[in-house]
Amino acid sequence: MRSGKLCYDRAALPLVTLADVGKSYGTRTVLGQVNLTVRRGERIGVVGRNGSGKSTLARILCGAEPPDSGEILRGRGARIGYLPQVPRFEGDLTAEQAVVQGLDAWTEAAERHRIASEALASGAAPAESLLDEQARAAEDLERLGGWDQQHRVTAILGHLGIDDVHVAVSRLSGGEQRRVALARILIERPDLAVFDEPTNHLDAGTIEWFERFVIEQFPGAVLLITHDRYLLDRIVTRTLELSDGEAYLYDGGFDLYLEQKAERLVHAARVERNRQNFLRRELEWLRRQPKARTTKQAARVERAQAALSQPKPKVERDVEFSLAVSRSGKTVLELSELDLTIGDLTLVRGLDLFLTAGERIGIVGRNGTGKTTLLRTILGEHPPGAGRVVRGAKTKILYFDQVRSGLDENRTVFENAVGTQTQIEVGGHFVEPITYLERFGFDRHQQRQPVGSLSGGERARVALAALLCQPGNLILLDEPTNDLDIETLSVLETLLVEQNATVLVVTHDRWFLDRVATAILAFEENQRAVLYPGNYQTFQRLKAQAQQDQVRAAPQRERRRPVPSSHRSADRGKKLAFKEERELETLPDTIEQAELRVAQLEAQLSDPATYAGGGEEIGTLARELEQARQAVDDLMKRWEELERIKTGEVTPSDSVGN
């Protein structure tokens, strides 16, 4: 053993350790002897079925709820930030004030720096100790986000869709309040941030921004509870699965988790087969033996009895969905020159859409652009500002809304889902209602529970069970992925694809759209809704290509712009130098190459494979992308400058760099 000063890696120090932590509610064990260590800088994703204890684990980790057993060890001075599913704010705060609450540590460091600086200026104390204190305070300020915090508060709120920082939090919707709470955690920069479903109520573009922020700018450790499979795959370095009170820890993101879980289940099945074979052999031997046995025989009997007493491995009950599809005509839905309006505000103008059987259209766009309004207009609940909504003669709509409004919290799961039905048609044959609900993951005991006692994900499954037992041929889904666990989402995706359902779905879940959508209807700027063929990745590629084509065409449009007569007369006797003429001729090709470099870097940063090895190169790629974008901007400015000289808008002597 080496003597001398003890060396250690501060990054490897644990922030929080759970040792044999258990938690039960009544007779139900949610967590049983869970062990977990969260170290500085790592990002852990937490997955599991609804009701498996993910949120309970988060509350215990943060100290918001005590465990029934076990021990929680927190690192000295470790700051933990927590985003619950339903955040609460004290007092009548604006959005800005609520976020600034997360700057307590920064404010304390700034005050220490101010006091040390003033003492140095006055000469009231030894300079050496004051300089040390000033340096420590400055280091803390940099670690906590730098000196310009007001700019960061406004910028982060803006990225999360809160443009009015002075709006009262009490006036915001539940989703907007969650975004304010998320901004507070991001500005706080705690040593460990615990996010419970942070992407609920965020649009796809904002989720992508959140991904980049956590990877590139957030220095602390992260524990992330989410059903967003792309987010898990791109951010996390380890994945924790909770199942039947047990905790299983895997290396890597979602893809690696699936591979390792499959290996674990295969191994468990092999062990169980070996145990069963051993039991069969021993039982046969016992039946053949006389009652008088030797010591060796007695030991063999004990081994057989011990094997018999071992519990069988828990088998996960599969969720099974089915859809009672009624026949539709060739035309399911037609929207013609449709305007979506709320009061005097026009959200979308001139939307045309012709929907045929088997099409599955994902609807994306920023919050507030009219996605839910479109569904309500199709249903006839909201009048169009202009245009027509024509439903096919045989079209029957099934609607799954965001707030699961059809559920009565005082009635049981059974009463909400199947009511008075005695038989339910599933795949061409009839089943008992109890059996039908078991396919949705509700055993007979849970079917008697009131819906008000369920988690958000369990409520969503009740709403799906109630929806899918009705016949229909056009399904409208408004944020169906909120609160649902990954397994349930996968089953729903398979159902929609294999039964060739006709679907309009509003969702921010990119993985869901990649598996399900045959086209993407994107609500864009300038009151436009544009239909792109293919799934979400295809939509991203086509939209990026359209933006590149638009930028590439800009120089050509500028070249063809007629020069005003005043400029033509002023241009007499003025022309570009030969070197500048050559530069202007080659600039469009140079700009195109620079834009291609930007596109390549963006593609790398959006590719899940980039993050598979832990994402060590992400910071470098992000910096290269920023430099590449700046290079495009500089080239465009130079091109515009030379064009103005050529057309006589400025004289060569006014130009920069000549």
Image (cartoon, rainbow, N blue to C red):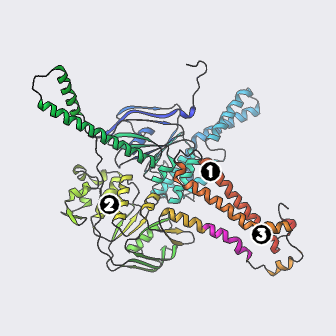
Q: Nearer the viewer, residue 401 or 531?
A: 531
Rounded to the nearest whole Å, what is the CA distance between mark 1 and mark 3?
A: 31 Å
Q: Which residue is mark 2?
A: 464
Label 2 amino acid? Leu
Mark 3 residue element:
helix
Rounded to the nearest whole Å, what is the CA distance between mark 1 and mark 2?
A: 42 Å
Q: Is any part of residue 420 visible from this angle?
A: no
Horizontal side of residue 358 vs 157, given as left or right: left
- Which residue sits at x=65%, y=41%? 142
Position of the C terminus by quadrant: bottom right
Q: Which residue is mark 1?
A: 621
Q: Residues within 10 Å of mark 3 (few under 14, many from 20)?
A: few
Q: Which residue is mark 3?
A: 585
Horizontal side of residue 560 vs 351, given as left or right: right
Closer to the N terminus: mark 1 or mark 2? 2
Q: Nearer the viewer, residue 444 or 92?
A: 444
Q: Is any part of residue 301 visible from this angle?
A: yes
Closer to the N terminus: mark 2 or mark 3? 2
